[in-house]
Image: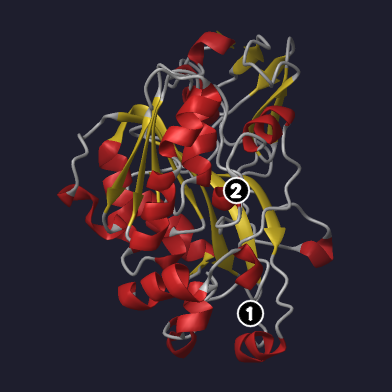
């Protein structure tokens, strides 16, 4: 399958216009600072973009970032701009044609951003074999990936390596494609479906289980959208399976609890993260307004207190009193319940 993917992204696809579905199309509303960064990216790099989401979390200045499956480098170069000259971004990909395109425009973007030296580098390798690359354990603040982990045969190996490479309190913030049921083996082996990021898509509940097995104990959904299958032949193959693009954040924090436990804690966002002065979006249902006490569960408290976000919050309460679960917590929600008008969520506090 590695060879099939290399051929699909190195030969079959010459630009994003060659895609047969909208899986690799980001229709999210881009923040102004991301639009500004994208405006500085070379058009040839933009034309080879095959991601399915936005992978630029908050508070990136000066950070070390690893991009898994970087392709021609669009996200690497955007992140290069966002981390600034003191930060660094490493991109890993297995496709020679994509890496050649990325390398070709490295110096172009250094000059465009006004950096004395480039703060990016690219490595060739398989995401299932990150241990074989020149990457130090616990050396990255953030790991990103844009619609690539679904292409990997051993997704657990990818997530376990990501956990090993992250600093304590770091996070993997990534977009990928998920299904509302397990994809049959015959479809998983179809090279076109796999190349279009559908054949290798995980069933959402299997992803949650796999993330927790890999050490990321409380996966958080940031945003999602349904994927439209406009190609009649592909739609006929897939039948009733529904696919979704979802952006998640997984923190490397030990001993997070399996549910939303209430300790009477709250946080106050100071409004000090650039571009997010009014509201901090921890996930799809923790949109924390500046200047107001915001009740949180113990896990959310730690995601803010033990990560790069600590300086941007005031913390109230301790761990002395346990009040049980937040109301409604423990009810399992399906990936999507559009017919019921419910939002996708994985927490209840």
- Is residue 232 or residue 141 the one in the foreground? 232
Q: Residues within 10 Å of mark 2 (few under 14, many from 20)?
A: many
Answer above or below: position of 223 versus 35. Answer: below
Locate residue 21, reporting x and y percent.
66, 73
Residue shown at the point (55%, 57%) measured from the top left: 48
Q: Residue 241 has which mark?
A: 1
Closer to the observer: label 2 or label 1?
1
Q: Quick one: quadrant of the C terminus?
A: top right
User: Can you identify the residue that label 2 sits on?
Assistant: 346
Locate residue 340, reporting x and y percent.
82, 62
Answer above or below: position of 211 versus 75. Answer: below
Answer above or below: position of 222 versus 156. Answer: above
Q: Is residue 78 visible?
A: yes
Q: Secondary structure at mark 2?
A: loop
Locate residue 1, reporting x and y percent.
34, 77
Residue shown at the point (60%, 48%) measured from the top left: 346
Locate residue 347, reporting x and y percent.
61, 43
Q: Secondary structure at mark 1?
A: loop
Q: CA distance from mark 2 to mark 1?
A: 21 Å
Residue shown at the point (45%, 59%) measured from the top left: 148
- Is residue 288 or residue 48 the one in the foreground? 48
Residue shown at the point (69%, 30%) measured from the top left: 36
Going from N to C along the chain, the mark reached first, 2 or 1, is 1
Left or right? Give the position of 125 relative to 284: left
Q: Is residue 95 visible?
A: no
């Amino acid at each position: 399958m590695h060879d099939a993917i290399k051929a699909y992204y190195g030969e079959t696809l010459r630009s994003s216009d060659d895609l047969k579905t909208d899986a690799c199309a980001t229709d999210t509303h881009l923040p102004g600072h991301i639009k500004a960064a994208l405006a500085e990216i070379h058009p040839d790099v933009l034309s080879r973009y095959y991601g399915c989401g936005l992978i630029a979390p908050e508070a990136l200045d000066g950070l070390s970032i690893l991009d898994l499956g970087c392709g021609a480098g669009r996200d690497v170069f955007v992140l290069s701009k966002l981390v600034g000259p003191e930060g660094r971004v490493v991109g890993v990909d297995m496709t020679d044609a994509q890496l050649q395109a990325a390398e070709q425009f490295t110096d172009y973007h250094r000059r465009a951003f006004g950096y004395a030296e480039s703060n990016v580098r690219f490595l060739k390798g398989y995401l299932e074999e990150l241990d074989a690359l020149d990457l130090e354990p616990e050396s990255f603040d953030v790991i990103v990936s844009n619609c690539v982990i679904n292409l990997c045969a051993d997704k657990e190996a990818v997530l376990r390596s990501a956990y090993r490479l992250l600093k304590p309190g770091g996070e993997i913030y990534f977009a990928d494609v998920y299904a509302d049921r397990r994809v049959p083996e015959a479809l998983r082996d179809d090279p076109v479906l796999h190349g279009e990021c559908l054949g290798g898509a995980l069933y959402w509940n299997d992803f949650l289980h796999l993330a927790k097995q890999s050490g990321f104990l409380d996966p958080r959904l940031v945003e999602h959208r349904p994927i439209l299958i406009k190609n009649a032949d592909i739609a006929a193959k897939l039948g009733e399976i529904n696919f979704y693009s979802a952006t998640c954040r997984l923190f490397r924090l030990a001993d997070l609890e399996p549910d939303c436990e209430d300790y009477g804690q709250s946080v106050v966002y100071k409004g000090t993260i650039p571009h997010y002065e009014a509201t901090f979006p921890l996930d799809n249902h923790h949109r924390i307004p500046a200047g107001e006490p915001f009740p949180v569960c113990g896990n959310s408290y730690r995601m803010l207190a033990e990560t790069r976000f600590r300086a941007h919050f005031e913390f109230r309460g301790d761990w002395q009193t346990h009040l049980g679960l937040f109301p409604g917590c423990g009810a399992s929600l399906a990936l999507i319940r559009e017919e019921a008008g419910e939002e996708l969520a994985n927490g209840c506090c």
